[in-house]
Amino acid sequence: MNVIEVEQLYSSKSPYFQKVWIKDTYKDSEGKVKTVKSKGVNKVQGGKMWCVVVKPDETVIHTGRTEGKQTIIWQRHEKNPQKVEYFKETVDTSLYEIIGYGYYDGDELNLSPRYWFYGKYSRQ
């Protein structure tokens, strides 16, 4: 199991546009502490939901849909290189919970995902 510490700061500009700043801190395979800073937006545009995160080495784009009043499903499906991700985010007044999985280059889509993600965040 890999552990990552994540800090996220959100700033809502309207009901349809939100900025996010992300700081991920983790230990690499040699035990050295690494920090990665990213920024992005969540937005409703053209009748669709989008989550766009600009990382130092790539730009990640997920499309979204709601499931009830407090849950958003985010997904991406890229073929070359393969990146298939699914995240279910549930938010209430004090808690943000996310569960998801990912398939990446070389993973077989007919098998259970090799990578799973779970996070529980509290409002600060």
Image: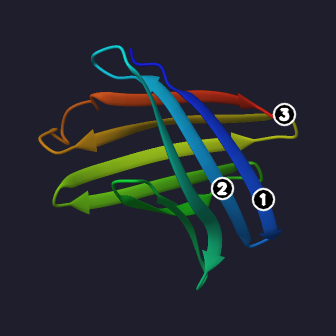
Residue position marked by numbered label 2 in the rendering = 20
Residue position marked by numbered label 3 in the rendering = 124
Classify 10 Å Cα crowding around label 2: few (below 14), some (14-19), many (20 and above). Answer: some
Specify how the rendered protein is coloured: rainbow
Q: CA distance from mark 2 to mark 3?
A: 15 Å
Horizontal and vertical percent position of residue 38: 52, 52
Marks 3,1: beta carbons within 8 A: no
Residue position marked by numbered label 1 in the rendering = 11
**Residue at image location 52% in from the left, 46% down from the top:** 37
Horizontal and vertical percent position of residue 48: 57, 75
Q: Quadrant of residue 55?
A: bottom left
Label 1, secondary structure: give it.
Answer: strand
Which of the two labelled residues, at mark 3 and mark 1, occupies the earlier sequence position?
A: 1
Q: Is residue 17 above or below residue 100?
A: below
Residue type pointed to by label 3: Gln
Which residue lies most toward the front here? 32
Horizontal and vertical percent position of residue 106: 11, 41
Q: Is residue 73 above or below residue 30?
A: below
Q: Is residue 28 above or below residue 78?
A: above
Q: Quadrant of the C terminus?
A: top right
Q: CA distance from mark 2 to mark 1?
A: 6 Å
Q: CA distance from mark 3 to mark 1?
A: 13 Å
Question: Which mark is drawn over residue 36?
Answer: none
Marks 2,1: beta carbons within 8 A: yes
Q: Quadrant of residue 91?
A: top right
**Residue at image location 59% in from the left, 46% down from the top:** 22
Left or right of 110, for residue 27 = right
